[in-house]
């Protein structure tokens, strides 16, 4: 998976602790510094392996489904100015909008101010 390659490349740079977030149909979050005992398999947390065969704590969720629900199926381009307005307004999408994943016990909502 591309997330393993990204983890390998980032580790080679020696920048210290890191978390890799790979987005797409699946959102995969790799954090090699997370204690293995912190993982909860009921919440789609698992132990992956890096390119050297070492354990990598991982969470995953169907981000593509989350994105589709939040966007209402929007397919067009989003102007950068609109993105900046949403950030300035403090808009945040809090999971979970689709079943499964590490926060599946919560209903998704969008919070924050109204973009100007």
Image: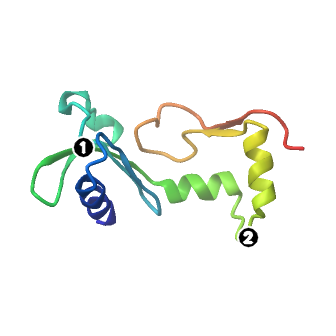
The residue under the point 24% across, 43% down is: 46
Left or right? Give the position of 111 relative to 56.
right
Q: Which-is-in-front pick, marks 1 and 2? A: 2
Taking depth in this image into account, of 57 and 98 the one nearest to the observer is 57
Please tell me whether residue 15 is drawn above or below residue 2 in the rendered image.
Answer: above
Question: Given the current orientation, which residue lies at the most extreme right position?
Answer: 116
- Quarter of the figure with residue 27: bottom left
The percent coordinates of residue 106 (x first, y second) are: 53, 31
The residue under the point 54% across, 57% down is: 65
Question: Crowding at label 2, few (<14), some or many (≥20) Cα neighbours within 10 Å?
Answer: few
Sooner in the amino-acid sequence: mark 1 or mark 2: 1
The percent coordinates of residue 107 (x first, y second) are: 59, 34
The percent coordinates of residue 9 (x first, y second) are: 28, 61
Which element is circle 2 on?
Answer: loop
- Quarter of the figure with residue 89: top right
Please tell me whether residue 18 is drawn above or below residue 23 in the rendered image.
Answer: above
The residue under the point 18% across, 55% down is: 50
The residue under the point 75% across, 61% down is: 80
Which element is circle 1 on?
Answer: strand
The percent coordinates of residue 21 (x first, y second) are: 41, 51
User: Which residue, given by chain and number where applicable, does mark 2 sit on?
Assistant: 77
Question: Crowding at label 1, few (<14), some or many (≥20) Cα neighbours within 10 Å?
Answer: some
- Look at the image and tell me in which quarter the N terminus lies: bottom left
User: Which residue, given by chain and number where applicable, does mark 1 sit on?
Assistant: 46
């Amino acid at each position: 998976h591309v997330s393993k390659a990204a983890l390998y490349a980032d580790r080679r740079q020696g920048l210290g602790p890191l978390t890799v977030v790979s987005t797409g149909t699946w959102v995969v979050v790799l954090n090699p510094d997370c204690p293995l005992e912190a993982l909860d398999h009921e919440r789609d947390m698992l132990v992956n392996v890096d390119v050297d065969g070492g354990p990598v704590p991982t969470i995953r969720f169907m981000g593509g489904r989350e994105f589709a629900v939040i966007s209402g199926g929007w397919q067009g381009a989003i102007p950068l100015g609109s993105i900046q307005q949403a950030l300035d307004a403090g808009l945040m999408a809090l999971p979970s909008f689709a079943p499964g994943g590490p926060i599946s016990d919560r209903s998704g909502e969008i919070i924050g101010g109204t973009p100007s």
